[in-house]
Image (spheres, rainbow, N blue to C red):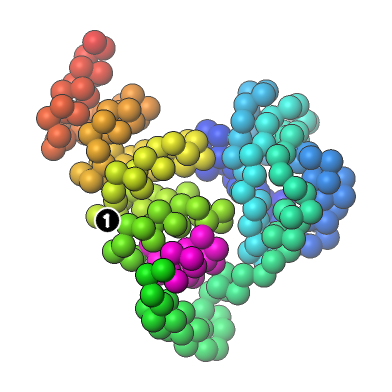
Amino acid sequence: MKVERKADAVFVAEFESEEELREEHRLNLSQGALRLPTGEKVALHVTLLVTLRGPWGGEAHVRATAVAALPDGIALAVDGNSDEMLERLLAREQEETPVAEESGGGDRNQNTWDRIRALSQMEKLLLAVKADRAERALLLQDNDPRVLLSLLRNPRLTVDEVVRMAKSSFLTFQIAEVILKTAQWMSSVEVRQALIFNPKTPPAFAMRILPTLPEADVRAIARAGTNMALKQAALRRLQGK
């Protein structure tokens, strides 16, 4: 299993084979547990958000609690139905294969683009909550904020995709509010940076994000921020007031 820490409380764990996945399910996942092999340190009883990725690109996003330190990692208690997790992790997502390595890849991408462009807005809203990676990449470019809101309900949405949404010129109060209220996304400094530097983010939300940013970002806002109230708040923070 390959494990990468994406943020303080966000990990991605990728199974390298079906055998490894099924063995982990038999030993741990079926019992509501997960062995996360990593050298990263996590305090006990902290809630983590873990993206599990199967050998063919299937993903499951789970909420987990660190319950014990292991010699080679962390023992987690995992929420959710383990059989459903296994089914999703064994799914094959064809769009994960680089198009340059397959004949006809360009045709498939063009077909996806043509198919989504032909959908009505209602059909796009329904697709967004279950779209695969290739479909999500196209839907993220849609100028209807309702489509972006629906994408936020997609359980396979990644941090990188939320960063793109947080930077979008189509960001609305409702989209920013959902992101702000979701710990999975707000645990990522990249998401917080994207929101606070987006002029579409409501000032009240930006004020809440400001104290969570690295000092370099606070200095940038104090020096060149376009919102005067936020700029003054950044200056006060730097002055320790």
Q: Residues within 10 Å of mark 1 (few under 14, many from 20)?
A: some
Report if residue 183 is visible in the image.
yes
Residue drawn at point x = 62 percent, y = 49 percent: 61
Q: Quadrant of the C terminus?
A: top left
Residue 120: image location, x then y, percent: 38, 75
Give the prevailing secondary structure in the magenta stretch. Answer: helix
Q: Which residues are magenta?
A: 123-140
Farthest top residue? 241
Q: Is 230 positioned to the left or the right of 12 in the image?
A: left
How many labels were placed on the picture?
Answer: 1
Say which residue appears at 39% left-offset and 61% top-offset: 147
| Label 1: which secondary element | loop
For badge 1, the amino acid type reads Phe
Q: Is residue 169 magenta?
A: no
- Would you place residue 172 above or below residue 113 in this image? above
For residue 181, what is the image quadrant?
top left
> Residue, x 64% and y 44% (percent of image)?
62
Q: Is residue 29 above or below residue 46?
A: below
Q: Nearer the viewer, residue 131 or 162?
A: 131
> Toward the viewer: 182 or 71?
182
Q: Quadrant of residue 143?
A: bottom left
Report x, y in % for residue 191.
39, 43
The residue identified by callout 1 is 170
Report the side of 162 relative to 173 (left or right).
right
Image coordinates of residue 63 in percent, x first then y, are 64, 39
Relative to residue 29, is residue 44 drawn left or right?
A: left
